[in-house]
Amino acid sequence: MVRITQILSLPPETLNRILLLGGPGIGKTEITEQYARELARKEGRTFVDLDLLDDTAARRLAEDCEGHFVYLRVAAPHIFPEDVSIPKPIASGDVIDFLTPVRLKILSRCRGLFFIDEMTNVKRADQRVFFYSLVQEGKAGWSWRLSPDVIVVLAGNLPSMSVDAEPLPAPLLNRLTVFNVEPPTVDEWCAYMERKYGDAWERAVCEFLKEGPSFLFEPPKEPEGLEAYPTPRSWTRLAVQLHILGGIKADEDLVAEVVYGNVGRSTGSKFLNFYLSRVPKEFFRKASRAVENV
């Protein structure tokens, strides 16, 4: 098993057709996008997140993507074979052609990374067959072909951690390199928060996790329920929310509920004892190395 952050050091040829298998909220999506952005920078290309393009810009890019690196993340359960090739009658009336959605058309022509998330949540047999062809041959339907310059990365949760997750068929697994991944270190998570949020997060979360690194990720005891549990994703959400609540001077009961709602009562109570101590919050809101310098 490797840390999710270690995939950042893989060459594109190794990352291609890889399945990242790990717990929910450990950073599979964030790290994959970070990899795509960094690869675009190394290749001197302009990074483009296809989810953020309007239809007009997407059509222009489909016609000319020279110098661009495209990125598209999709949830596998939301993609169906009929979405790829849409029937279109030809004028003669006795034959049909097939249309391809513009973002998939871009992936057939451009350099980029196609991230297929929640792969272990796919239920329908025809969807699974669709992904067999996509992963092995880079094609699907009657007319869509994936560009050989596109890296395909898949991700999924372990069945023991998600009630929706299921084992994958052996023929599909045989088409993939399976990486079992675990969460980043606390230092890696804190560095990520600094890069992404600057001063707009509560650094007390980082200091608490440094005191107890095991609290960064505590998978649920049962794969379904109503109790929150700590993951890098939920700590990220909590750190941002606490920064906002600090600005409005929210009362302690409200703060406690926000904490419990993100990381659960067991871990949340430990964090609250730390956070609501007599240590001034400004102590944690200084520069990232404030604790070491004081």
Image: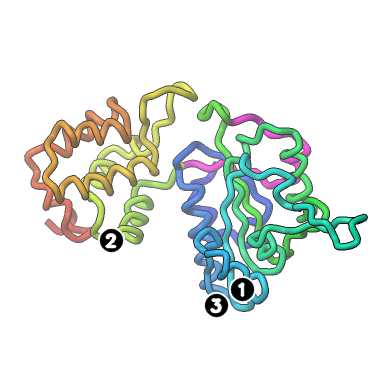
Q: In the picture, which quadrant includes the N terminus?
A: top right
Q: Residue at x 68, y 58 (%)?
A: 101
Q: Nearer the viewer, residue 213 or 63?
A: 63
Q: Does the magenta segment cover residue 237? A: no
- The spot of residue 147 in percent (x, y) is 73, 64
Q: Which residue is mark 3?
A: 44
Which mark is first along the chain, 1 or 2?
1
- SS class, disc 3: loop
Tag on residue 258?
Answer: none
Q: Residues within 10 Å of mark 3 (few under 14, many from 20)?
A: few
Q: Which residues are magenta?
A: 165-182
Disc 1: which residue: 60
Q: Earlier in the sequence, mark 1 or mark 3?
A: 3
Q: Residues within 10 Å of mark 1 (few under 14, many from 20)?
A: few
Residue 24 falls left or right of residue 251? right
Q: Which mark is residue 198?
A: 2
Label 1 – label 3 distance at C-alpha: 20 Å
Instruction: Give x and y (percent) for residue 271.
Output: 23, 35
Residue 197 placement: quadrant: bottom left
Q: Nearer the viewer, mark 1 or mark 3?
A: 1
Q: Which residue is found at the position 22% from the left and 28% from the top?
A: 269
Which amino acid lies under the numbered mark 1 shown in the image of this protein? Answer: Arg
Residue 40 falls in image quadrant = bottom right
Front residue of 199/189: it is 199
With respect to residue 287, does 164 lie above or below?
A: above
Q: Quadrant of the C terminus?
A: bottom left
Q: Residue at x 75, y 52 (%)?
A: 86
